[in-house]
Image (cartoon, rainbow, N blue to C red):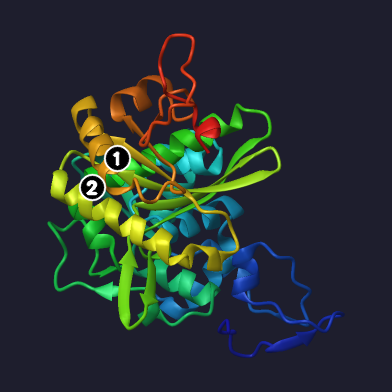
Amino acid sequence: MLRLEEGEDEVRHARSPAKASVAAVASGTPARLGHLIVGKLAQRVAHLTQDDLEEQEVISLLGLRLTPCQWSILRLLVAHPLLSDEELAAELHLQQRSVRCSLYVLHQLGCLEPITTRVGKRWHLCGRGLRLIASANQRPMCTMVVVTDEAAHGETSAMAQPGEAWLVQHVEHTAGVYGFFARLGQAAKREAGQALCWWETGAMCERRYRVGEQWYNLRPDALAQYRVGREQMRFWLEWDRGTMNGRDLLLKFASYAHYVASREWAREDTRLPGLFCVAPDIAQERRMQRVAQTRLTSTPELLVWTTTEVLLHAYGPLAPIWLHGLPQRSQAARPDGSLRQALPEAM
């Protein structure tokens, strides 16, 4: 509730009977006001940075000030902390200049902060931004944040999202996964009838399931849904920076084989996702291929495809850069003799 000036009428009745909330403003859903709250709101919104405003009042007024683009940035950073300027622009299908203007405003309003990393500047929500999102979605703050003991090198606030510390610690891996989907989304825009519908990382794409009395976990780097015409297809992404040896790869593929055999994936009312793996170089890709052929022979329904960062950066994710992890005799080679296929064909 917005605080009203002394002596003002607290409520004036409007014509429609419904109520409006900050959540309606955040979601962009039109709301018909049942009560009109007055009290020089326009003046307050214009002076949000004043020191004499209480934080609760600032959060309420921010719901009136932020643009749809700024709300979209906040929601993206909730789902994917540590996105860069370029990745935010790609996700929003906007020019980087426009995104940077919105980022500047949100930074000035105290909603987000930049973090200097080994792969460049990245953004994350600070306390006010997290409180705003929690208020807009009517969620308790304790479900959205963890409190750190101290700020890391003075670059981050003492309030962060769960899992954010891991993303910072493995920022090269984080940038690899984020960059993949930024490029895939941009490439899909140039193809008629194709689109990257959604993608998720971290706890959102993890699956915990039970077989008998034993619990198991599947932890892919990402899960996404891609559309080709009327077909909706899901796939898992594994981004390997060359840190996984043969044993690590064996355990990784074994976890997928067990999940597929359990048929837990069928509970989501969708076809079995494919598994796409990106290796840093051809040597690691060949290691992946050998392990996949050893471990997944008894799970032929799981389609595994691999490529390298070199090919991905040179030709893009939709190009014929993907190699089947379990080559089939019936698999036709391309005119140049390569068995690699484009991502929509692989799906």
Residue 130 versus residue 12: which sits nearer the camera? Answer: 130
Residue 344 vs 292, above or below: the answer is: above
Classify mark 1: residues with Cα within 10 Å, few (<14), some (14-19) or many (20+).
Answer: some
Res. 50 visible in picture: no
Residue 184 visible in this rendered orientation of the protein: yes
Q: The N terminus is located in which quarter? A: bottom right
Residue 307: x and y in percent read: 34, 30
How far from the left and from the top, in percent, is residue 227? 62, 42
Q: Nearer the viewer, residue 140 or 110?
A: 140
Q: Total marks drawn? A: 2
The residue most toward the top is 336
Residue 240 - label: none
Residue at image position (48%, 15%) is 334
Q: Which residue lies under the disc numbered 2? A: 171
Q: Nearer the viewer, residue 78 or 181?
A: 181
Identify the residue at the far right of this view: 15
- Name the spot of residue 224 as percent of width and height, x first: 49, 50
Give the structural element (helix, strand or loop) at label 2.
helix
Q: Residues within 10 Å of mark 2 (few under 14, many from 20)?
A: some
| Residue 330 placement, left or right of 36 | left
Residue drawn 33% across the image and 64% down it: 126
Q: Residue at x 33, y 46 (%)?
A: 238
Rendered image quadrant of residue 18: bottom right
The numbered mark, 1 or 2, whose residue comes first in the sequence reads 2
Residue tagged 1: 293
Looking at the rendering, which quadrant does residue 79 occupy?
A: bottom left
Q: Amino acid at mark 2?
A: Val
Residue flagged by tag 1: what amino acid is it? Gln
Query: 279 or 29: which is nearer to us?
Result: 279
